[in-house]
Structure formats: C-alpha cells, structure tokens
Amino acid sequence: RAFGAVGACVARKPRPYPSLRGLTRVPPPTTETETRASLSDRGPSSSGNARPAFFSKLDRLETRVETGVGRRVSMAASSGDGRCDNKHHAPPVVSGEEFHRRASEICHPRARDAHASFYSSWTDCITCDPSAFVLPMDDHMAHRGHGVFDTAHLHLGKLHMLDRHVERFFRSMEQANIVPPFDEETTKSLILRVAAAGGLREGQLRFYASAGPGGFALDQAECVRSVFYCVSVKKRSSPAGADSKSDAPASPESEADSKSTQSAFEADFKRDSNESPPRNIKHQRLETFLQIKGVSVVTSKIPIKPPFFATVKSTNYLPNALVVADAKSRGAEYGIWLTADGAHVAEGPSMNVGFVVGVDRGGEGGGAGGGNADGEEQGHVDGGEGNDDEEEGDTSEREKGEPRSEQPKQKRATFVFKTPAWDETLAGCTVARVVEFVNEGRFKHLGITGPALVGKITLEEAKNANEAMLIGSVINCLPIVTWDGAAVGKPHAGKVGAVAAAIAHAIAEDFERNEPELTPVPYELFE
C-alpha cells in the first residue's frame, strides 16, 4: 500500500506554477544599501521596458498568488527580528559584517544568560559572545549528524570525572570514524581553557567532534578536516525533578506529606549502633532526600536505536528528542526505551536507569528477582527490622541452651542494585560510578548487597521493583514514582525511596570529595 501511495504521488500531474526560465540575471548587490537601491530603481531594461524582465516576471508571479491561480506560494516579509509578518518576503542580501551585527542583536536571552564560552578548532579561538557560538552550515555534524559529543559536570570550579568522559569521547570518535582533531591531553587542556575563559563555577562543559566542513554530500572524504568544538554552559536553575522554590506558604496537606516522608526516610535509614553515621552526614542525606522530587515516566513508543548506534554518543539525537516529546504528550516527564525485543528495559532519552530488586540469600541460596515474599512482608529496603528480629530470635534460642546448628536456616531478605546491560545502551559514566558505590558497600545499611548487577531486566520486573530511578551526570539521580500511570516502589508506592536518596547524596558528595577524579579549572589564566 505504501508503494502504491508513492506511485500515485509520482503519477499525479503537478499543479502549474510559474516558470523561472527567461528571467534576466541581475548581479547580486554587496551591501544592504545597494540591495534597497536595486529594488527601488533598476532603470529601463535592454528591451526598452520601463522595468527589467525580472520585475515583470515577479509581477506576474504575485498576480498568480493573489488571484489563487496556479500553485499557492507562501511569501512573507522580514520584520528585522527574524520573524516574517506578511506575505511579501524580501530578505536583503547583506555583507558579513551586517550579518554578524544582526546575529548579535537577535541572540536570545537564554544564550546571553547561560552560554559562557565557546571554542572552535575551525577558527582556533575562544569567544564569550554567545552570538558567535556558530559552526559552518556545511559541517557534516550539522546536516548529516556525523559527530559525537560528551559532557563533563562542573562543580565548585572543578570538573568531575573529566578523564572518564574524555576516554568515552575518544571511543565514540573511533566508532564514528572521525579522526581525533587533537590527542587526549590537548583535548583536556582545551576543555579546561574554555571553562576558565567562561568563568563559571557551576555548570557543564559540552565538547563535540565533527567530521568537519567541506560540502553537503554524505561522503566524509569531502571534509576539509575534523573539527573540535567546546562550550561551557551554566547549570540549569531548576532542573527536572527538583522542587522549584516558592515563597507561597506550604499547604497543610503538603506539610503532612513532608512529615510522613521524613518519618519514612528516618525509618529506612536506621542502622546498627556500631554503624551509625555522623550526625552531619545523616542531616545532609535527610536534606537531600527532602529536596528530591520523584518523576513520572512512560514506556516509550519510539523505537530504540540499533545497538551499534545506541552505544556511541553521537549528535544524532532525533530518536532521543522524540522520546521526550512522546512522554510530554502523554503527561509524563521522561520516556523509557525498551530493547529491540520489546521485553526488556533499556534506558532513558539521555540517562541510564537503575532498580532496587529483591534477592534471596541464605537457606538453600537464591538468585536475582523482582522482589520476593520476604521482601514484601518486611517492606523496607534496608531489611533492618527483619534482620533485627532474626538476630533476637537466634539469641533467645541460644539462651535456652539449644545448639545453633539445630536451628533451621531462615531466608534473609536482601536487595541488589540492578541496571540494564551496556551492550544495547550507552555506558553512562555516572551509573558506572554508582555501581562502584554499591560494590564498595556504601549502601549496606539499606540492605543493598554487592556486587551490583548489570544485565537484562524485564519490564514487569522493573515496574515491580522496590525502587526505580534515572541516573545521569546532569540530572544526578531522580526517583521514578509513577510508570505508565501506576505508582512505583515498595512499601511507599509513589514516594521517593531511601536508596535513591542515598545515591543522589553519594553522587553529590562525589562531586566535592572524590579528589582523584576532580580536575581544577585554571581560572588564573584569564583573571
């Protein structure tokens, strides 16, 4: 049917439209003044007409448009601010100087406020004028999507995990068949210089590698050379998932909900007496927890990229953008991709996903699963009360003099952190760091045992997990509280979970305390 429709379109007789043959070629003016003069007075043509043939043809074209004869043409005139407000579109031909003046005037407020500095190896200079954050239109990254990128988080004047992001950047270039414009050390040096020139202490450094300018064909052989771009951007003032600040007084319902959430948090964070954290750390975690807002997601209808393209961080983000648009149209904030088989969870549009799922340890052994009876009865992800009861039971039996070996082994409910395998999704640097946290035992007090699992997880298992979350360098960790309209999480369905809060705090803490992976920005170069 599709082929038949295409054939019908081809066979259909096109609507008549004015021919451009016979038009007198007029040399293009070089300045805006010349343009206006040329349009107002061209003088008589060689044929003796009062106006040249060009204007005669144009008059006939305008007549056909106004009378509805032939093909309708939408024409609009430029208002000078980039908008077209009527049907007579006559943009002037201007000099490069005039073009840049107009570009500077029309630079949008967001760019002036948030875009701090920019480097292009095509021009080999850094600029802090956001209207100059441009690249050639014939750059293959612009019209073919032949480019890759990566992002490093800037916090308190230091770049977090810069080496990891640059290493992935170079892997992406190799996969995309792009010759690295610079080696790794030079690339890192340029990123730091761009950050220093922008002067930001909080934000992101986004860096790109393109096949380069050279033409509009597919073949990159026409590209003059590969190009490196880098831009420093302010941190978003109100990122998704964070409660926006408001001066309005809190409602009694929200205050009660906050108190119940705080109580749930404190219950989930109970530890044994010999493992109690310092009070300031507990306070920081509680503060982090109360500031986190859960997000809603839907299972995306947009097909996922094939594994080869899903595992390279390319600039071709049309599928990713459509995932977000699809989610917004369905009343959610993010969409979740499924793998090509449609049975397993893959990733979000620009972030990874993680889950807290139950696992049986003890008795005759057990394996990973989407929760179990013990976990559901116990309720809390830390397994605190269940574990305490078990220990008390063992003690009472020992006090009666019965040997421990005669007591039947009880299944002990514990939990694992699980994230989808990276053979069909992008290997995120932040989720990899979270896996390291789990393997280091950072969340043992919540009942999370290592090692973390990186493997397949079904959609049913994900929706029935004790906790679900989105993880990325820009968003940090956002708990998923609803999925396809249904509440997520146990035992507090639809609420922020303790593990997600602990992971969010651990990531934030890593931005400040993980000195081996913090690279100071040399602001002194431009001060």
Image: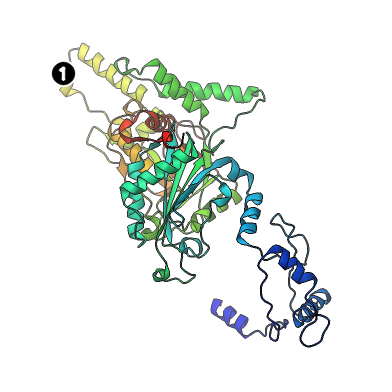
Asked whether residue 353 appears in the rendered view, the answer is no
Where does residue 96 sit, x and y in percent of width and height?
Answer: 60, 60
Q: The residue tagged with tag 1: helix, strand or loop?
A: loop
381 or 41, nearer to the observer: 41
| For residue 120, above or below residue 505 | below
| Residue 99 left/right relative to 33 | left
57 or 495, nearer to the observer: 57
User: Residue placed at 60% from the left, 83% from the top?
Assistant: 10
User: Residue placed at 32% from the left, 20% from the top?
Assistant: 388
| Residue 482 left/right relative to 153 | right
| Residue 479 left/right relative to 163 | right
Number of residues whose C-alpha sits closer than 10 Å to that of mark 1, classed few (under 14), some (14–19) or many (20 or more): few
Where does residue 408 sit, x and y in percent of width and height?
Answer: 22, 26
| For residue 504, above or below residue 485 | above
Task: Using the rendered view, name the quadrant where residue 196 is placed.
Answer: top left
How many labels were placed on the picture? 1
User: Residue placed at 43% from the left, 24% from the top?
Assistant: 285
| Residue 129 left/right relative to 82 | left
